[in-house]
């Protein structure tokens, strides 16, 4: 009996020893990703970046949002805005922005690829805006005026024209439809080509007037004598004197102000 007990004890001991030897070895964990593979990731503050799978496949490295670009919206830049030419087609388009390699949001990419504007670009409207000084003939303002109005689009159909200044920041606007189309388009095209035209629009009398000044000077008048002095809205930079007009006030010998005309 004693010999049988020892034999059985020996067998049990060997079995447990074998089991312990097997339990001491663990299999290598399966890789989480394939080394070198990249995927997009979210950056702090918004936007997306890129992260790569580690060499051992144990997971992805930290999100790389690019040097100096955290994915925030890029600042709009428009290099062709020229005050004298009043290019507003690009006032909100970042023509010179270059797409960054990483970190750009979808909005950034759209901004980066904005097309270059041309002076007087009428993509979203075209604006003339110049400062006039009391008692001073508007010589440079006349040059800018003629350049701007001739740059208006021949093919665009303008649906609104606005004239404004410090005394009326919202200004007067014409958006009425005429028999042959928007009255604003008739007025803006008359400015472009230098043709006299008059419309009653929104209860106001709008005129594109010629010959009030040197040569074939073109002016835009609302509720005011075209070539006389009064009150109202008059933009006539090429009159050849200091009676260049005014906004919502005197149109002769007016106080210094910035006058703005927009066709859109």
Image (cartoon, helix red, strand yellow):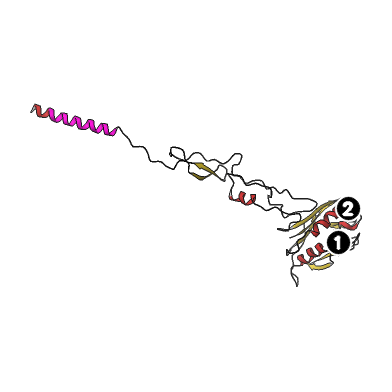
Q: Label 1 vs label 2: CA separation? A: 14 Å
Quarter location, residue 102: top right
Q: Quadrant of residue 264?
A: bottom right
Q: Is residue 169 visible?
A: no
Where, by quadrant of the figure, is residue 171 drawn?
bottom right
Element at badge 2?
A: helix
* Chief secondary structure of the magenta portion: helix
Horizontal side of 56 relative to 233 (left or right) equals: left
Q: Earlier in the sequence, mark 1 or mark 2?
A: 2
- Tell me the quadrant of the picture where the N terminus can be found: top left
| Left or right placement of residue 111 versus residue 210 in this view | left
Asked whether the viewer can see residue 185, the reply is: yes
- Magenta stretch containing residue 30, yes or no? no
Give the magenta range.
6-23
Read off the residue under disc 2: 139
Point out residue 233 in the picture as x, y percentages from the top left corner. Answer: 83, 60
Residue nearer the viewer, 243 or 30: 30
């Amino acid at each position: 009996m004693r010999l049988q007990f020892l034999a059985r004890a020996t067998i049990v001991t060997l079995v447990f020893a074998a089991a312990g030897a097997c339990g001491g070895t663990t299999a290598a964990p399966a890789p989480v990703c394939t080394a070198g593979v990249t995927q997009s990731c979210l950056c702090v503050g918004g936007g997306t970046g890129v992260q790569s799978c580690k060499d051992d496949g144990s997971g992805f490295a930290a999100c790389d949002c690019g040097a100096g670009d955290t994915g925030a919206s890029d600042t709009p830049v428009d290099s062709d805005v020229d005050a004298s030419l009043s290019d507003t087609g690009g006032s909100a388009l970042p023509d010179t922005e270059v797409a960054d390699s990483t970190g750009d949001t979808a909005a950034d990419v759209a901004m980066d690829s904005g097309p270059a504007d041309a002076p007087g670009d009428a993509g979203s409207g075209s604006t003339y805006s110049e400062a006039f000084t009391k008692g001073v003939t508007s010589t440079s303002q006349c040059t800018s005026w003629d350049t701007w109005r001739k740059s208006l689009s021949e093919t665009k159909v303008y649906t609104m024209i606005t004239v404004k200044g410090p005394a009326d920041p919202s200004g007067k606007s014409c958006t009425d439809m005429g028999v042959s189309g928007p009255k604003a388009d008739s007025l803006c095209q008359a400015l472009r080509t230098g043709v006299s035209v008059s419309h009653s629009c929104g209860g106001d009398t709008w005129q594109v007037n010629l010959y009030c000044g040197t040569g074939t000077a073109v002016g835009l008048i609302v509720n005011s004598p075209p070539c006389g002095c009064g009150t109202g809205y008059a933009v006539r930079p090429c009159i050849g004197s200091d009676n260049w007009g005014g906004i919502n006030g005197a149109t002769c010998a007016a106080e210094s102000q910035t006058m703005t005309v927009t066709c859109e």
